[in-house]
Amino acid sequence: MSKLFSGVSALVFLVAAGAAQAETKTITFVFTDDDQGYVERMAELSQEFEAAHPDVKVNFVSSGYDAVVKQLPVQLAVGEGPDVAKIADWQLAPYYLDMRPYMKDPEAFAKLHGGSLDQLRLPGINDPNSINGYVASQTLNLPFVNKTLFEQAGEPLPGPKASLKEIVEASARVAKATGVQIPFTMDRSGHRFSGGAFSYGATYVKDGKFSFPDEAAKKYIADLYAWAEDGSFPKEMWGAAGGSQYKNMGDEFVNGNVVTYLAGNWMVNPFQTKIGDGFDWTAINAPCGEAGCFAMPGGTAIVGFKRTKHPEVVAEFIEFLGSEKIQREIAENYVILTGADIKDPQYKLSSEDAKASMAVFLDNKKNVPEAAREFERMKGGTALYQQIVQRMSQLIVGELSLEETYKVLEDDVRKINEAVSTQ
């Protein structure tokens, strides 16, 4: 059974999933992605699994990313929620099901997915040999640029060592010359924010605790604020949504309203489909700063949860989705860097722009700050991301001054450190 939903209401029906068909083993699978074709394929794969297992029903729920981020931790904390979900929050590790005892061939699964399984295991929380799911995608954040607009403005593309400041200023010149509405933007996300922070030299963690914002982070925040004030980084982008709510700006780029858009490799496939021959585009190298040229790493995973009543079904479903055959299909058809070790994937890149962009992303895999990977595995990291989004929004729309933003963030971090220490 497949159900497609979006928004905050998407997860409401999860708690009682399967009650209507007591004679079957019912599991709920929550999935979210910006690529609608990928979402539809995962729904089809869920149906294929059902067809091969007459005693199993898979409630496939496609939900908005923000709903998953906000509701899933709350549901799991009270023993509710789905059996399987796609996540981007490693802090859910305490709720993972170890599927190794239930898998038909755990060693083959572990060999295919290799060291990527370590990303899911948090020290002191998960068994070092546990199989909790698999890394569905490995991501990098880089700027996408509208090449056609740069050409129309007579502005050269930012070079391979361009700083974020240089990229934003060039984008502003292009927007002024072409009349385009948005010079530079990024998704409303603490993760998207953080690549620039690391390149400026920000340190998120010191002596095992969060220490944000240091002087480098303050300089970065001040620059973003200045760009918001002069229109290079439009206030409407972060100010339109409240609190820590995530907001994707991909459609604005697709519609030709954005000169430069900081996102990630997961947008390459949707862009080649949606943009078509509308304009020329490409990804460019990670913006540079005093600390280096850093591409913010990230990832998503598909995991099973302890609260399931059917661990053997969840394990078999994960083995099915995480198999070499399906992982190869997903990697190639949806242009995804999987955690599985897929030999020589033949990415289906129909446009030269998409091919060029993927080449840039692959080349930037070497530009990942190790401190960013360590931060993302720390308990409380998600809370810090959320506070960054909220406080940056308040700064940009004028609710806080720069100095007030720094002080409030310091207080937020103190509270997060206190909460983590008592858990």
Image: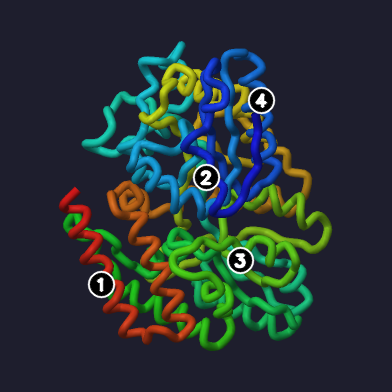
Q: Viewer-proximal residue, 341 or 42?
A: 42
Instruction: List x then y, in percent, for residue 240.
Output: 56, 74
Label 3 to label 1, Cα distance in Å? Answer: 29 Å
To which residue does mark 2 refer? Answer: 11
Please name the residue that numbered disc 4 is placed on: 47
- Spatial separation of the CA atoms under disc 3 and disc 2: 30 Å
Please name the residue that numbered disc 1 is placed on: 410
Contact? badges 4 and 2 (CB < 8 Å): no
Q: Earlier in the sequence, mark 1 or mark 4?
A: 4
The residue sitting at 34% across, 67% down in the picture is 201
Mark 2 nearby-residue class (10 Å; few <14, some 14–19, many ≥20):
many
SS category of the residue bearing label 2? helix
Q: How many marks?
A: 4
Q: Earlier in the sequence, mark 3 or mark 1?
A: 3
Say if 262 sits above or below 264 in the image. Answer: below
**Mark 1 or mark 4: which is in front?**
4
Question: Mark 1 Cα within 10 Å, few/some/many (few <14, many 20+)?
Answer: some
Residue in view at x 24 percent, y 38 percent: 123
- The amino acid pointed to by label 1 is Glu
